[in-house]
């Protein structure tokens, strides 16, 4: 009997650098559980992502998208393509005021949510928002792209138990 190909199940994590330690611990545990269930982590290589990425046993189950080479010391060559900039511009409310580095970061975010070719969206986005954080706009861009593409967004800033219940309900429906 022929072996069936496992379904491609990417998900994204985006957090502000101010993510509380208890939430980060849950994200790491959740990452391990999702990997065991066949999911692939997509992320943008921010500093907070390091511990989450390291929780993935099989690093081939991590899709890392960077705004430029050696971003946060990641040795990974993927940089945003032209279509990612177009998508970022379309979804960012103040694109004209952004510095070029910020534009690259938001273009990278297009790939995190929509994939390398911008045609393979994640199944869902897990995030932690903090409107007062310096990097809040990056997480907000992830949410804008996910919302516009009708992708579920699970935000731990709404409460740990609430968010875990929402994720479990989604998983029960889509298992």
Image (spheres, grey):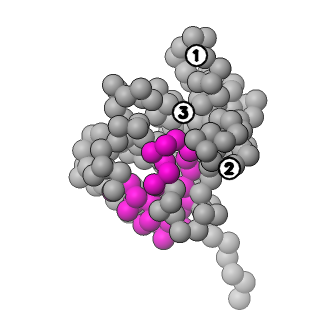
Q: Determine the residue located farthest toward the top in the rendered image.
A: 97
Report the residue at 59% width, 57% height from top: 62
Alpha carbon separation for disc pair 3 and 1: 18 Å
- Location of residue 43 in the rendering, given as x and y in whole percent from the top left corner: 55, 47
Alpha carbon separation for disc pair 2 and 1: 26 Å
Bounds of the magenta span? 26-52
| 2 or 1: mark nearer the eye | 2
Q: Determine the residue located farthest toward the bottom in the rendered image.
A: 1
Report the residue at 58% width, 68% height from top: 58
When the figure is inspected, residue 10 is found, relative to residue 58, above or below; the finding is above
Q: Residues within 10 Å of mark 2 (few under 14, many from 20)?
A: few
Read off the residue under disc 3.
145
Left or right relative to 1: residue 38: left
Instruction: Report helix, strand or loop for mark 3.
Output: helix
Callout 2–callout 3 Cβ contact below 8 Å: no
Read off the residue under disc 1.
98
Q: Residues within 10 Å of mark 3 (few under 14, many from 20)?
A: many
- Location of residue 135 in the rendering, given as x and y in whole percent from the top left corner: 45, 29
When the figure is inspected, residue 30 is found, relative to residue 166, above or below; the finding is below
Residue 75's label in the rendered image is 2
Report the residue at 68% width, 49% height from top: 75
| 2 or 3: mark nearer the eye | 2
Q: Determine the residue located farthest toward the front in the rendered image.
A: 73
- Location of residue 54 in the rendering, given as x and y in whole percent from the top left corner: 50, 60
Alpha carbon separation for disc pair 2 and 3: 26 Å
Instruction: Report helix, strand or loop for mark 1.
Output: loop
Q: Nearer the viewer, residue 72 or 170?
A: 72
Circle nearer the N terminus (2, 3): 2
| 3 or 1: mark nearer the eye | 1
Circle nearer the N terminus (2, 1): 2
């Amino acid at each position: 009997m022929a072996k069936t190909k496992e379904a491609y199940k990417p998900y994204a994590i985006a957090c502000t650098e101010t993510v509380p330690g208890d939430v980060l611990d849950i994200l790491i545990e959740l990452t391990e559980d999702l990997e065991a269930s066949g999911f692939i982590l997509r992320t943008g290589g921010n500093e907070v992502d390091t511990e989450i990425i390291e929780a993935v046993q099989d690093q081939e189950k991590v899709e890392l998208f960077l705004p430029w080479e050696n971003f946060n010391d990641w040795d990974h060559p993927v940089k945003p393509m032209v279509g990612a900039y177009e998508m970022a511009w379309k979804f960012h409310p103040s694109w004209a005021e952004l510095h070029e580095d910020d534009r690259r970061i938001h273009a990278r975010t297009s790939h995190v949510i929509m994939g390398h070719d911008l045609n393979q969206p994640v199944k869902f986005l897990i995030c932690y928002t903090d409107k007062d954080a310096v990097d809040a706009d990056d997480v907000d861009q992830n949410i804008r792209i996910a919302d516009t593409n009708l992708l579920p967004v699970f935000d731990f800033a709404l409460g740990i138990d609430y968010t875990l219940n929402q994720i479990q309900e989604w998983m029960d429906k889509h298992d």
